[in-house]
Image (cartoon, grey):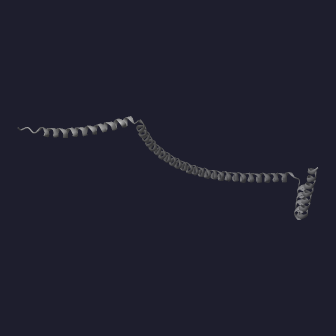
Amino acid sequence: MNQQPHRDKTADDLGELREQAERTRDELGRTVEALAAKADVKAQAGEKVAEAREKAAVATGKAKEKAAQSADLVKEKTAQTADLAREKAAVASEKAKEKAVVAGDLVKEKAVQSADLAREKAAQTADLVQEKTPDPVLEKAGAVAEKVKANRTPLLAGAAALAAFLLLRRARRGRR
């Protein structure tokens, strides 16, 4: 009485069975795809190779970036070192110039002192020679000096002729 006809039950069961079959097919399809993916070693290897290539590309990019940064740093350091070397060379050059000036001044000072000392010694020697030399010899030397001063041109010409003669003689001996 309250029971539904058998058909209605069967219809519901049939619908449920179809749904179950559809779900089972879907699950089975996914399972087969998963198993196929696991079984497809070539595809997995390709994926791993692709991943490895991607990682290598990233690593290469990072390495190139680091190399570029390092190169820039090296260039910068080289420029700084070159600038520092130029500065030090300029300072050293300036110091050397200063020392050369000081040394030149010392040499000049020593030369002046030596010249003064030589003049002093020459004056002392002249005084000593004048004291020790007899008067007649001094008079004759003075007379000769005056004659030389008065006749300077012929004396210089004679000295030049003598020098030329000696040079020619020496040149002739050198050829033989």
Residue appearing at x 87%, y 52% in the figure: 133
Instruction: Judge whether 23 appears above or below 173 on screen.
Output: above
Tell me if 100 is positioned left or right of 23 in this view.
Answer: right
Instruction: Judge whether 34 appears above or below 150 on screen.
Output: above
Tell me if 8 is positioned left or right of 144 in this view.
Answer: left
Point out residue 78 in the picture as x, y percentages from the top left corner. Answer: 55, 48
Viewer-proximal residue among 68 and 104: 68
Point out residue 10 in the picture as x, y percentages from the top left corner. Answer: 16, 38
Residue appearing at x 92%, y 54% in the figure: 166
Number of on-image labels: 0
Instruction: Judge whether 17 appears above or below 165 on screen.
Output: above
Outermost left residue: 1
Viewer-proximal residue among 31 and 121: 31
Tell me if 87 is positioned left or right of 25 in this view.
Answer: right
Say which quadrant the N terminus sits in: top left
Point out residue 84 in the picture as x, y percentages from the top left corner. Answer: 55, 49
Tell me if 94 is positioned left or right of 52 in this view.
Answer: right
Viewer-proximal residue among 90 and 44: 44
Viewer-proximal residue among 110 and 170: 170
* Residue 17, image quadrant: top left
* Residue 39, image quadrant: top left
Residue appearing at x 49%, y 46% in the figure: 64
Residue appearing at x 50%, y 48% in the figure: 68
